[in-house]
Image: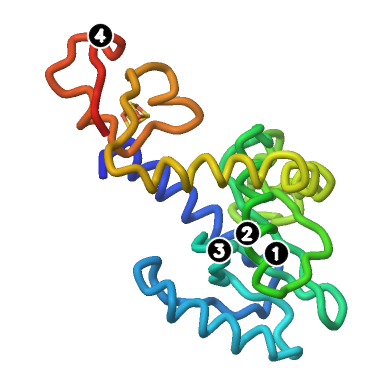
Amino acid sequence: MSSERQAIFDTGHAAGELARERFPSGVLVEEAHFEHNQAVRKTESLLTRTDIPAIYEAGFTFQGIRTRVDILKRSGHSAFDLVEVKSTTRVKPEHISDVAIQVYVVEGSGVLVNRAYLMHLNRGYSNQDGSPDLKQQFSLQDVTDAARSFIAERAAGELARMWAALQQRDAPNIETGSHCNIPYRCSFYGYCHQNSGSRSDRKIQH
Ligand code: SF4
């Protein structure tokens, strides 16, 4: 992992851990991402515990799509609010699709989602005395309607397109370009840009 990606990862990790304090007394699904099936089983067991107000890093699989939810907060007896934590200072378009797919997978797994939120850092907040005020440090934005619109209008098509690409024997023949960095730098950036003076002068076989 590059130092740049590591820094983003560390910042995101720290924000995620701090954000949990805003939904206290929850239980963390500690299994690592490569232990996904165990995480799903642990989550299934925690979902039955009505005495637990929140689950952190809950794991789900639906239609072959795996997700871990930053915070799943109990909302009534049989529904949950889903909270995705971002270490950015505003909601970006790609965050909506991220939340939408999580809602799609969680509900596909049989868990009803009441509201979906993006929790991001509050740009105007400055912590003067060393004790963070979590209500001010983070902004909670309700993106339920946007996420549900994405699911209704785009999720099926986008997922079908991705599955079709994954099932091809050969990787798509695509030129490098701005999509290699936007919205995130691609994990294959180094591979695709090796021996390349500019990113647009080379076609790559994935
Ligand atoms: S796989 Fe290569 S060409 Fe495709 S987005 Fe990533 S870096 Fe760019």
Precedes in sequence: disc 2 or disc 4: 2
CB under 8 Å between callouts 2 and 1?
yes
Label annotation for residue 63 = 3
Give the mark toward the camera: 2 or 4: 4
- Give the residue drawn at x 66%, y 32%: 93
**Tag 2 and tag 3, C-beta contact below 8 Å:** no
Q: Which residue of the protein is positioned furthest toward the left in this rendering?
A: 195
| Secondary structure at numbered mark 2 | helix
Rendering quadrant holding ligand 1:
top left
**Residue 186, numbered circle:** none
Report the residue marked by disc 4.
Answer: 201
Label 1: which residue? 22
Q: Earlier in the sequence, mark 4 or mark 3?
A: 3
Counting residues from the start of the chain, the first of labels 2 and 3 encountered is: 2
Foreground label between 1 and 3: 3
Is 136 on the left or on the right of 56, as rendered? Answer: right
C-alpha separation, residue under disc 4 versus residue under disc 3: 37 Å
Give the Cα separation between the discs numbered 2 and 4: 43 Å
Q: From the image, state whether disc 4 or disc 3 is nearer to you.
A: 3
Task: Give the mark nearer the N terminus: 1 vs 3.
Answer: 1
Q: Amino acid at mark 4?
A: Asp
Q: Position of residue 135 (x, y in %)?
A: 76, 54
The amino acid type, in three-letter code, at marker 3 is Gln
Q: Quadrant of residue 17?
A: bottom right
